[in-house]
Amino acid sequence: MAEALSRSADYRVLRRLAPRLPSSPAAGQETRVGILLDTETTGLDHARDEIIELGMVKFDYTPDGRIAVVRDTFSAFNEPSAPIPPEVTALTGITDEMVAGHRIDEAAVNAFVDGAVISIAHNAGFDRKFAERYWPVFEGMAWGCSATEVDWRKHGFAGAQLAYLLNGAGYFHQAHRAVDDCHALLEILDFVLPTTGAPALALLLETARKPTVRVWAEQSPFELKDSLKKRGYRWNDGSDGRPKSWHVDVCETALDDELTFLRTEIYLREVEPRLQTLTAFNRFSSRV
C-alpha cells in the first residue's frame, strides 16, 4: 500500500527512520571521520545550565561529502545538580529518575571522538558551547552547523528545523532525544539535494571550510537598531566579556559591502569596525 501511494503524485509517504547499524569501513576507500553530536540540557544558558544527555554518531565520509558507513554510536545520561525543569522533561521525555546516578565519562568521550576531523551539530552555536565546557577535546576540533551552513530553503525545504528537513527527506523519528536526533541528521546530510546533485553534507563541508568575518557595530546609534536587525545583526549584551554591541558574521567576499553599509547608513562617517576572522576551529565557540 505504501509503495502504491508513493508512486502517486497526490500522496507523500513518510517512513519511520531506521538507524544505520555500525559497520567497518570499506577497504581501500578514501574516507575521513566525522562526529554528529547533540545535547539535551536543563536550559539554554551554556554557562549555568547543565547537560543531561549526550548523543553522538561517528561516521566515515568520502572527500566529495558522501557518507560511507556509521562506525559507532554513543549515548549517555548525566545527572544535573538540581531537578530537571518540568518543561525540559515535557520536551525531551527525560526525567530525574532516568538520569539519577549517571555521569558521562570524559575518557569515554575522548576515546569516541578520537580520529574525527569535524563535529557537526544541528545548532552548533548551542551544542559547541556546552560540549567545550564539559569536554575540552572539542575545543581543538573543527565544527560545522547543519542548521545555518546550508541554506535549506534555497534547496526546496520548508525550513531548517530538524523535523522539517526529515519530513522533506521522507522520514519521521522520535524527536528530542540526543542520539535519535543524530541518526536523523545523518540521513538529512546524506540526502542528495536536487539543486546540486550532491549530498547536503558536501555543501555543509564546503561552507564550513570558508573563513567568515565577524563585524562589530560598536556604539551604533540606538535609533538605527531596527536597520541592523533587518540586516541580520544580533545583539550581545556584554555579559560574556565580548563587546556590548550589535554584530554580524559575513563571508570574506561580502565584507566590503558590509563596511560600506555601516559607513553610509549607520555611522555616516568613515569608521573601522572591530573585525574577527572565524574558521571552523573557533566558529560557534564561546571562546570567540
Image (spheres, rainbow, N blue to C red):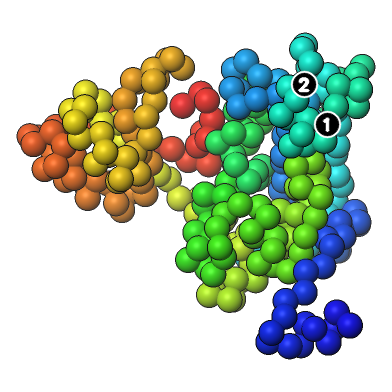
- Rounded to the nearest whole Å, what is the CA distance between mark 2 and mark 1? 8 Å
Q: Position of residue 81 (x, y in %)?
A: 77, 11
Question: Which of the marked residues, 2 or 1, is nearer the chain's N terminus?
Answer: 2
The type of residue carrying mark 2 is: Ile
* Residue at x 64%, y 59% (from the top left corner): 164
Tell me if residue 223 comes above or below residue 191 in the rendering: above
> In the drawing, does residue 171 fall left or right of residue 126?
right
* Residue at x 37%, y 29% (from the top left corner): 235
The type of residue carrying mark 1 is: Ile
Tell me if residue 175 comes above or below residue 191 in the rendering: above
User: Do labels 2 and 1 touch, CB within 8 Å?
Assistant: yes
Q: Extreme left residue here?
A: 269
Q: Position of residue 170 (x, y in %)?
A: 73, 69
* Dot 1 alpha-carbon crowd within 10 angstroms: few under 14, some 14 to 19, many 20 or more: many
Quarter residue 54 falls in:
top right
Q: Position of residue 190 (x, y in %)?
A: 70, 64
Q: Which residue is mark 2?
A: 84
Tell me if residue 3 comes above or below residue 201 in the rendering: below
* Viewer-nearest residue: 200 or 237: 237
**Res. 221 visible in picture:** yes
Question: SS for tag 2?
Answer: loop
Question: SS for tag 1?
Answer: loop
Q: Which residue is mark 1?
A: 94
Say which mark, if any, is on residue 133: none
> In the drawing, does residue 40 fall left or right of residue 237?
right
Q: Position of residue 250 (x, y in %)?
A: 36, 46
Of the 4 image quadrants, the one containing the N terminus is bottom right
> In the drawing, does residue 89 fall left or right of residue 232?
right
* Residue at x 83%, y 23% (from the top left corner): 78
**Res. 32 visible in picture:** no
